[in-house]
Amino acid sequence: MVILIAPTRDKRQITHLHPSQSRGGGREEVNLVSRIILTCFWMILVLSSVTVKAQFSKGADVGWLQQMEATGYKFYDTTGSEQNCLQILKDHGINTIRLRVWVNPSSDRTNGHCSKEEVVDMAVRAKNMGMRIMIDFHYSDSWADPAKQTKPAAWASHSFSQLLTDVYDHTTGVLSALKTSGVTPEWVQVGNEIIGGMLWPDGSTSNWTQLAQLLNKGYDAVKAVDSTIKVVVHIDQGNDNGRSRWFFDNIRSQNVRYDVIGLSYYPYWLGSDYTVTINNLGSNLIDMASRYGKEVMVVEVGGDYTKVQNTYDMLVAVINKVTSVPGGKGLGVIYWEPEGEKSWSGYQLSCWGADKKPTAALKAFLTGPSGITIKKDGSGFRIYPNPASGGSFNVDLTGMKPASVISIFDMNGRLVGEQNVNDQPKASIDISLIPGVYMIQVDSKQQRSSGKLLVN
């Protein structure tokens, strides 16, 4: 909130505005009118200088979602009710959707689709739900990542100069289709995990000059469609500062244009617990923002869906590291395919259980940088006794039916317990809690509400 105070002015200056009003009531009227004018003037000056901090991006890459739905997969919320997957994600704090786009993909359900038309359809759905959008150009017909950056089949025999045109035309084509449909992405990735370059062999890191030209051609294409879109350059292993410096020092030497550094972070693929590398991720994010003067994001993260508590803790830690980047340059965290349950996708790092419901790990996105966000909506469920001793307490769920899930968090945002109560009017919980303050969150089909519990 901005409080505006109109500056006082010498009356001689005020009367100078209207010399015909020189004494008595006329002078008072001029004084009042002039003060109103000056107040408006200063309001314009002050408001024009106010910078509104953008909302922290909590995201989900959901490239599989359309095909999961097309094959009849059903999604259920934490209470067991069938629900739109995007709504479930939104109810868990997700405000951003990331979508990959391939050039001429196959119809394979897990390794294909993600065409321009499908991406436009999904982006419109997400936007209509109030989501922010990131588009991830792979410049391939299927997966592009550190192990492979295969040219689209239609571009395979093209010269390098033609490849530059291909990148520009494909990028503008997809973004123009999005804009025509009413969607302007907030971010666009030019390439996906391009630590080794893109469109091999022409744009590999063995030829930085050509890679730079391809990246700049993508940048120019994005800005030609809408100059407000932020361009992201994305590499893997966000915990590795030497690797990150090597790549971004080289593209800086080639005068590559971009706005945001995007990093992946997967402790699972690093072969060690997140606690081994999380501080390295944090220090690298700070170094990237400072060394290159760029905003930073973790655009891909994930954990083993069977290790719910560990994945939850990892996500909270990652969110805290990104929000700790000085100057507000840490923009957000995006989970890669949280909805991609293993029985459908074969993927181990989703955030969905075999019961077709999100695991409790996804609740990490309900946390802020200092812990769980407490939402008060007037429902007024009652916790008793409060204070409690020994961790045994009751929750009166009157007004919270039908069906409820009770989650218990410590004040650092760590999930310490969860219980399904299945339409019961009261829940009795006996859980070992050390003395301290806890947040109790109740989810039902109708609402979400929170309250505090003190354990002596």
Image (tube, grey):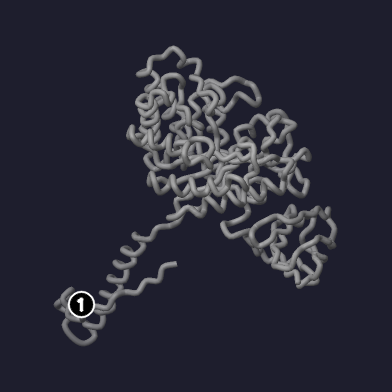
Residue in front for this viewpoint, 370 or 435: 435
Mark 1 closeness class: few <14, some 14–19, many ≥20 residues within 10 Å: some
Task: Tell me the kind of residue under disc 1.
Answer: Ile
Image location (x, y in percent) of residue 335: 60, 42
Q: Residue furthest top?
A: 157
**What is the count of numbered marks?**
1
The image quadrant of residue 165 is: top left
The image quadrant of residue 305 is: top right
Q: Quadrant of the N terminus?
A: bottom left
| Left or right of 397 on screen, residue 16 | left
Q: Is residue 317 visible?
A: yes
Please give the name of the residue rendered at 78% of the width and 46% of the height, measured from the top-left corner: 80
Residue in front for this viewpoint, 227 or 110: 110
Which residue corresponds to mark 1? 14
Please give the name of the residue rendered at 69% of the width and 40% of the height, measured from the top-left corner: 304
Relative vertical location of residue 203 with respect to residue 352 in this rendering, above or below:
above
Please give the name of the residue rendered at 46% of the width and 39% of the height, measured from the top-left corner: 242
Image location (x, y in percent) of residue 236: 52, 35
Q: Quadrant of the C terminus?
A: bottom right
Q: Is residue 128 visible?
A: no
Relative vertical location of residue 120 with respect to residue 320 in this rendering, above or below:
above
Secondary-structure class at tag 1: helix
Image location (x, y in percent) of residue 205: 42, 26
Image location (x, y in percent) of residue 330: 48, 50
Residue in front for this viewpoint, 165 or 288: 288
Q: Residue furthest bottom?
A: 24
| Left or right of 439 on screen, residue 25 | left
Please give the name of the residue rendered at 70% of the width and 57% of the height, measured from the top-left corner: 447
| Left or right of 245 on screen, residue 315 | right
